[in-house]
Amino acid sequence: MVISCRLWVEPMLRLEISGSVQGVGFRPFVYNLAESLNLKGSVQNSTSGAIIELEGDKEAIEAFLSSLKSEHPKNAKIDTIHKTELVDKNYKSFEIIESELTGSISANILPDLATCPECTKELRELKNRRFEHPFINCIDCGPRYSIIKSLPYDRANTSMSEFAMCKACSKEYKDPKNRRFHAEPIACKECGATLSLKKKDGSLIASDTEAIKATANLIKRGYIIAIKGIGGFHLVCSAQKREALNKLRERKNRPTKPFAVMLRTLSDISKCTEFSKEEEELLTSREKPVVLLKKRKPHRLEKFCLSCECIAPNIDRVGVFMPYNPVYIMLCDMLKAPIVVTSANLSNEPLCTDQKELEEKLGGVYDYLLDNDRGIINPIDDSVAFVLDGIPRFIRRARGYAPEPIKLPFRLKKRVLALGAEQKNTIAIAFDDKAIISPHIGDLDNIDTLERFEKTIALLKDMYDFEPDIIVCDKHPSYSYRKYLKNQKTEILELQHHYAHALSLMCEEGLSEALAFCWDGTGYGDDGTLWGGEVLDVSKEGYKRAYHFDTFRLLGGEKAIKEPRRIILSVLAERFFDIKDIKESCQILKDIDDDQLKTLLKMHKSGLNSPFSSSVGRIFDAVGAVLFKMPYTTYEGECGMMLEALYDKSINDSFELRLEEDRICFKHIFEELITQKDTKRLASMFINSLSSVVCEISKDVRKPIIFSGGVFQNRTLCEKIISDFKKIGKTPIFHKRVPTNDGGISLGQIYYAGLHETR
Ligand code: ZN
Ligand code: ZN
Ligand code: FE
């Protein structure tokens, strides 16, 4: 029975707490608080959070309730407190009791957290019993999601169930006054997992501290080591050795794509980058994501870290993070030098989590292996973020953040499963007022990622005892998950990709209408062409395609993505009719041999395997291809980042992008791009012109103006829009909770299901 407000201070009370209260020191906090107030009763984990029962005098209970809200542990998050009258149980003391396993599951699974300052101190303390223990953790830090098999979050339900606690650990685990009370993954050198440095044939070189020492030496000597982290393996090498980096690039077949660098201290980070207060907070946060920072110019200490041309070539940003687990802390302490740390996976596949998989896929890439025997149940990548306008924004939402739920602006009647997009896939489940978005899964065009996709759905279903009433998917008819969908008997809703982009941001902001600039790579449009330069007018009823970039053919479909000169060709073929003229018109078209050029022009004419597209992402590629004379790109977003690096704030000129009916005309700018030489000016003009056209379209709009899609990972463009909007008295809205790229699509799909319900 729910009691009224007047009665909640009655001396016997049961509190049902929902939120992130498991594995964060919530129960010991409750225990100590109750003890200090002389209250009797109990606390236990439940499937929805925690249950507290209290007996004692009125004032004490009142004090308890106010402290519960204001003083709870920093990693705990209370969503709701449901109070009921308690049948007198005659408690003799206050106790912590075993988890109750009834009811539907809705407690939150916690993300993996970086080693806390307290544990870091103990790790370095010679006299501490966990000195140099490579798996040190406590109630405030350590693995969570990556080791969990099912809820509630108890040791028996994690991969730590294989390790029996020693006496000393067990004492800490059971002591409510200890900061490791019910820290599920706790262990020590006596009873925990073992670290082992191995040769590729599996033979052991060294264990534990010795293994880290030997690893440090091997890194100094230029070797590439596969290191098992929290959510999977990394490939690690020295950031000071050109040969090592070149070897890593060559072996991983990754000629120019930027790597992330791990640096030990903020002062080290400041040697090679510039960062703001907000960026510093993000770097040192409990999540410790990879943060994209501006490279310091000129590089004062190029020798300290090769961040200029080897680590992140041709761009002005570099991804930086700080050691976030005991192994990396110890390794960085020993090396006192930066290391390159990159995911051990084939491009866009899930991380490798065991030695066998690693050997099969990347056997030729690493020289040695720093392994351990703590199982990774759920692989998870490092998160990647950047700061825009003082606020952190995700490029990839994974370790440290996922799968923490996102609160919906309404309550769902039905249970919804959203399948996300094909690239940068995330899936989401939602019920009541919360959406649980999976960590970044990857690109679904390969079997292993597709398998991870299905496993992640199974995992979330299992953990939350969840069966969907509705599945929402993308409209694209040939997404890889269509096969999975065929076997589902649930009702299916299909949603246009860019509308989903808009809705994902509207969900974050709780908006019911907006003018949405949805600019990205490509998504399947309502007319069967590939959209990606859309301005959608979104209302409660649905959306209207208010404007879109003028369409152009993607010659050879997918091929045009890797070879952006095909886009230039496609645009120029509308202006020049003679092969000779076309070749003469643009430097990078000269190398295409006549036969191939003829074939491509035929495709342009007939449309064979050359769909129309309005993608701004592709236009970025084409502009970059002309300016940098780059016929091919080697990774997604390369041209955009190179253009950003050239951007000069003092240049105010821009190209005129004309609005003709619902089209944003851009093709004429290529005439200037191919004839003029000042790349810095042209790059700046291009970015300025995008912002100008946004302002032109937005100036008389009354609705909130929102920006979603991969193009808005371009910080320079976003900053330009912010400053131009100030001049017209408007505020642009960008993503805060999910990535602006396709990683956010699943949240938009959830929001759609909610809107559908209320219609
Ligand atoms: Zn800790
Ligand atoms: Zn122990
Ligand atoms: Fe997209």
Image (cartoon, rainbow, N blue to C red):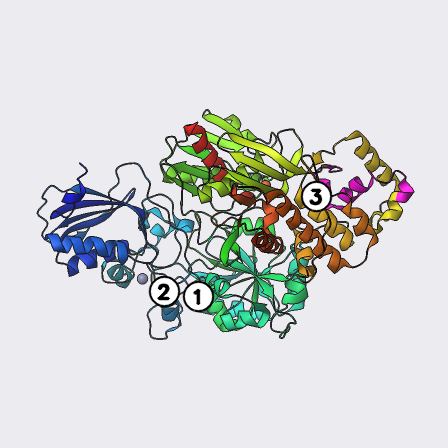
The answer to whether the residue labelled 1 contacts the one labelled 2, judged by CB atoms less than 8 Å apart, is: yes
* Residue at 59% in and 54% down: 727
Mark 2: give few (<14), some (14-19) or many (20+) Cα within 10 Å.
Answer: some
Position above or below: 736 against 409? below
Residue with the mark numbered 3? 561
Tell me the CA gap for discs 3 and 2.
Answer: 51 Å
The residue tagged 2 is 189
Q: Amino acid at mark 3?
A: Ile
Amino acid type at mark 2: Lys
Query: Where 355 sits versus 136, above or below?
Result: above
Give the amino acid type for the residue marked by disc 1 in the picture.
Asp
Report helix, strand or loop for mark 1: helix
Q: Nearer the viewer, mark 1 or mark 3?
A: 3
**C-alpha gap between disc 1 and disc 3:** 46 Å
The quarter in which the C terminus is drawn is top left
- Residue 432 point in image, percent of width and height: 36, 36
Mark 1 and 3 residues: CB-CB less than 8 Å, in contact? no
Residue holding disc 1:
208
* Magenta segment includes 574: yes
- Mark 3: few/some/many CA within 10 Å (<14, 14-19, 20+): many
Ligand 2 within 8 Å of the CB at mark 2? yes
The CA span between labels 1 and 2 is 9 Å
Whole-percent x, y for residue 97 in the image: 20, 49
